[in-house]
Image: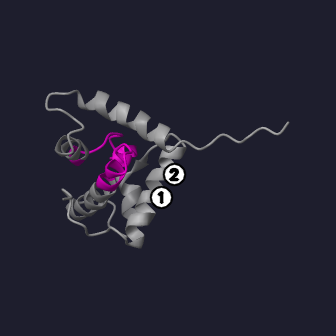
Amino acid sequence: MPLVPSKYRGTTTYYHVHSELVRAAQYRGLTTYQDLAVIMALPPSGSHMGSEAGHVLGEIVEDEVGAGRPMLSAVAVSVSGRPGPGFFGLARDLGRLRTGEDEQAFWEAECKRVYEAWRRPLPVESR
């Protein structure tokens, strides 16, 4: 049973946010919660934005982890350049981050796993 109740699964909002995360991962970059708020037609800050962005990210993460991939939301960060506490809480709930484990090291390692999972294929050289 999912930890995050479904609210966005199957909606265009879910797929737009997922696409933004994949694009960031393919370029080994990051996206911000504010970027996601724009995609979701939410205010750029505030508790409502944080709650809704966190909800869709939670659904995406559950689906990605269920498919055997890393936490795609690792590439989504706040203006501080780091994921919010919801990222680490969900990682603990999913058994991916142990209590007492270094959050920064976990996040950096998860970003690397995401980049590897979503890397763009190199073009084949013609000979």
Q: Is mark 1 on a helix, strand or loop?
A: helix
Dot 2 crowding, Cα within 10 Å, few <14, some 14–19, many 20+: some
In which quadrant of the rendered view does residue 34 lie?
Answer: bottom left
Can you say which quadrant of the picture contains the N terminus? bottom left
Q: Residue at x 21, y 59 (%)?
A: 4
Q: Which of 123 and 14 is in front in this view?
A: 123
**Disc 1 to disc 2: CB gap under 8 Å:** yes
Per the model, the C-alpha gap separating discs 1 and 2 is 6 Å
Residue beneath label 1, please? 19
Q: Which x, y percent locates residue 2?
A: 21, 58
Residue occupying the far left of the picture: 99
Render colour scheme = one colour
In which quadrant of the rendered view does residue 98 lie?
Answer: top left
Q: Which x, y percent locates residue 3?
A: 18, 56
Dot 1 crowding, Cα within 10 Å, few <14, some 14–19, many 20+: few
Q: In this view, does 5 lie to the left or right of 78?
A: left
Whether 1 is drawn above or below 41: the answer is above
Amino acid type shown at disc 2: Arg
Q: Which range is magenta?
A: 61-86
Whether 95 is drawn above or below 21: the answer is above
Q: Which residue is drawn at 26% across and 69% down?
A: 7
Q: Which residue is drawn at 30% across and 61% down?
A: 56
Residue beneath label 2, please? 23
Amino acid type shown at disc 1: Ser
Magenta-colored stretch includes residue 1: no
Q: In this view, does 93 lie to the left or right of 78?
A: left
